[in-house]
Amino acid sequence: MPTVTMTVNGMERSGTVEGRTLLVEFLREHLGLTGTHVGCDTSQCGACVVHVNGTSVKSCTCLAVQADGADVTTIEGLANGADLHPMQEAFREHHGLQCGFCTPGMVLSAVDLANQNSDPSEHEVREWLEGNLCRCTGYHNIVKAVQAGAQAMGGGS
Amino acid sequence: MNDFTYHAPTSMDEALGALRGAEGGKVIAGGQSLLPIMKLNLAMPSDLVSLAGVPGLADIADGGDSVTVGAMCTHAQVAASAIVQGRIPALAAMADGIGDAQVRNAGTIGGSVAHNDPAADYPAACVALGATIVTDRREISADDFFRGMFMTPLEEDEVITAVRFPVPARAAYAKFANPASKYAIAGVMVADGPAGMRVAVTGASGDGVFRVAAMEAALGDSFSGDAVAGISVSTDGMLSDTAAGAEYRAHLVTVMARRAVEACG
């Protein structure tokens, strides 16, 4: 079975996986990083979004072996100790979550947008979140949170 | 998903060797089409050969009268490319409308073209623009490449390396997308370029991309939305599913064609 090594939230992590092991399975089941969620498992809902080499991808539609050697960031890697990442803080401040299941993917997706656009319009945020579904339909506050978080980040994470 | 042997070659020769040595090998690029069908056991390869480590497959080059896009370029790369935006803005806009941001960050042009999903966007762009599919061993005209749902002339061990698009005088793409997947329910690329006046439709037919000769002729006489607005396509062979029936899809082809022509300016 293949061995994969990747940098996860700044730490080198290795594991022996099957070829078919998904990145999200490696993160959750091998590394115990259960902040990344599995919603639909069909690359629709975005609960599993993580960053691979700085861009957001759906970790349910990526093999662990494809991420061998990559730099991966999950929701657990955003905060600096007790200090929330500005995007997390914006979600808290603007109540950008209801049940919270979609939130890790929403936040990671939003950080990717903010890295490219520090002042996204409401329309740009809604377009960008095409691949992140909130079954509570709490989009209104999510959009507000993403705009505030992007401004707080000042164009870089 | 069934298990498989994964190969991460660092050269094209090594990749081809891995494919030839496999019982039922498949190339994996971004995996955005292949992994979902493997989860459904619609594809059960014995081996997956990744192209991620093969150098030289992710470049975009301006060749003057054409733009060549490396097979491993992601949709996000194509959408953001200054070369593509400058030379074939319709292609950049089309790439920007595929799936969602995360799919565009991982999915590639080579993977989309090789998969030939009947609702994918790239087949319409390739046929309308008169593109050439470049592989490790030959060049195949888009006209000969898309052979019906999921069918292409690629050999079992053949690898797409790039797609070359002639630069058109004008072109535009209009898509009526499935609101969940963003796949085309009907997508029409109109192009006035070196390959002539072309109208290529994706998403609508079970056979995949097709051209509408009557619209092409009408646009040759008069390049205006009105020229195609009265031309309808047959419902024969049109897909019919929960998103749209055959008649509605046929209707959408005309509407999208008119919108694409009008977007050409």
Image (cartoon, coloured by chain):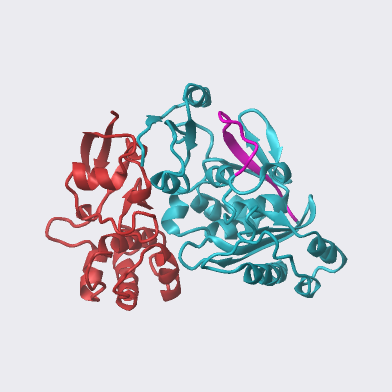
> Any magenta on residue B161?
yes
Q: Position of residue B118 (x, y in %)?
A: 59, 53
- Left or right of B68? Residue A86 is left
Q: Is residue A9 visible?
A: no
- Left or right of B164? Residue B223 is right
Q: Quadrant of the C terminus of chain A?
A: bottom left
Chain B drawn colour? cyan
Residue B96, above or below B22: below
| Residue at image coords 70%, 61% | B236
Q: Position of residue B248 (x, y in %)?
A: 63, 72
> Any magenta on residue B226?
no
Write down the region rendered in magenta. Answer: B151-168
Residue B225, above or below B69: below
Q: Quadrant of the N terminus of chain A?
A: top left
The outermost residue toward the bottom is A140
Chain A drawn colour? red
The outermost residue toward the left is A82
